[in-house]
Amino acid sequence: MTDQGTEPDSTDVVVVGGGPSGCAAAVFTARYGLDTVVFDRGNAAFRRCAYLENYLGFPAGIGVDTFTALMHEHVAEVGADYVADMVVSVERPGDDAGGNASDADARRFVVRTQDDRRVEADYVVAAAWYDGDYLRGLDDDDAMFEEHDHHGEVHEHFDASYADDDGRTPVEGLYVAAPSGERNAQVGIAAGQGGHVARCLIEDRRRERGFPGDLARHYDWLRADTEFQGEWGDRDRWREWFESEVPDDADLDDERLAELRESYIDRAFDTRRTDHEVETAEPRGIRRLVEAIGTERVLDALPDEALADYLDGRELGGVEQ
């Protein structure tokens, strides 16, 4: 991504906020294949936490800075861009007076940042706790903001109930993962909310492209090779199943329906993993985890006896090779 320039960069999704909800949303959209940029001003609300002890997968807890580094490494691993910059405004210049975009180009958002970056995007996911002023002008402010009396002074804040439970808003293409009330109050739940909102965004995008009924839903799920044994290893069986799931009232011609069907089946087969691929993936996953945390920190955490055994084994391995 260019730092500055007269012409805006272009992407599919801009996520505003690099905390748990924003990073989780970015992982889902990027893994689906959408070009994704995360803008983060670097002070996620959960940094007020002294030490994170209730996030599943870390039995004795994990430091907030370490967890943040892992989130950002994950964002990079899936191919999304993480940019340390603050979003100051989101506009949609092509909207008509009624707030409805007339075509694909007109409904694109223009995201502007504190460091003078401009990015055009099809979708924006709000995932930042700060006041939400950057969203002003996208809808009636009375609908997006609410007043609070704080020690005798009236302040306006983004209304956490503006979006529905799935993060969808009255503004087409705008989704909210944060603020989202109590769903943002705990890190584990906030991450889940970000992933859920991203899945809803993907579902809406698939509907726009014609996927009918439940076929628009997307599950980021890798399948074992055994699930493609027998009849389910045959594309014709998948075609038969797909056509059985198409609602009777689907308004699609045969050619477009066939394109969507083959696209669906291609994506399904792309999730197939052999036993060897799984065996290879796990050590790589652990290695990336150690790299992100820092090899020296991992070794320092080992008991002296385990570290000595590790070093002895490594030296022997070097001799044998």
Image (spheres, helix red, strand yellow):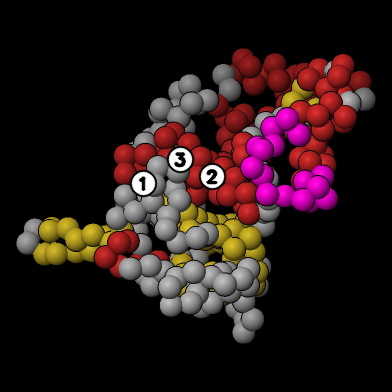
N-term-proximal mark, 3 vs 1: 1
Callout 3 touching callout 2 (CB < 8 Å): no
Q: Residue furthest left?
A: 152
Is 173 in the magenta?
Answer: no
Question: Which residue is disc 1 drawn over?
Answer: 180
- The image position of residue 216, as x and y in percent, is 64, 42
Residue 185 seen anywhere in this rendered image of the structure: yes
Kindly identify the amino acid type of the residue bearing the numbered disc 2: Cys
State yes or no: residue 248 in magenta: yes
Residue neighbourhood size for the residue with mark 3, other residues' Cα within 10 Å, grouped as few (<14), some (14–19), many (≥20): many
The residue that disc 3 covers is: 193
Residue 281 in view here:
no
**Amino acid beneath label 3:** Gln
The residue lying furthest to the right in this view is: 321
Between 251 and 192, the residue placed more toward the observer is 251
What is the spatial separation of the Cα atoms under label 3 and label 1, in whole angstroms?
Answer: 8 Å
Which residue is at 50% across, 60% downward? 172
Dot 3 or dot 2: first in sequence order is 3
- Single out the residue that lies furthest toward the bottom: 6
Which of the two discs, 3 and 2, sits closer to the camera?
A: 2
- The image shows residue 273 at horizontal and vertical percentages of 80, 27
Region in magenta: 242-259
Q: Could you say which is closer to the camera, residue 216 or residue 219?
A: 216
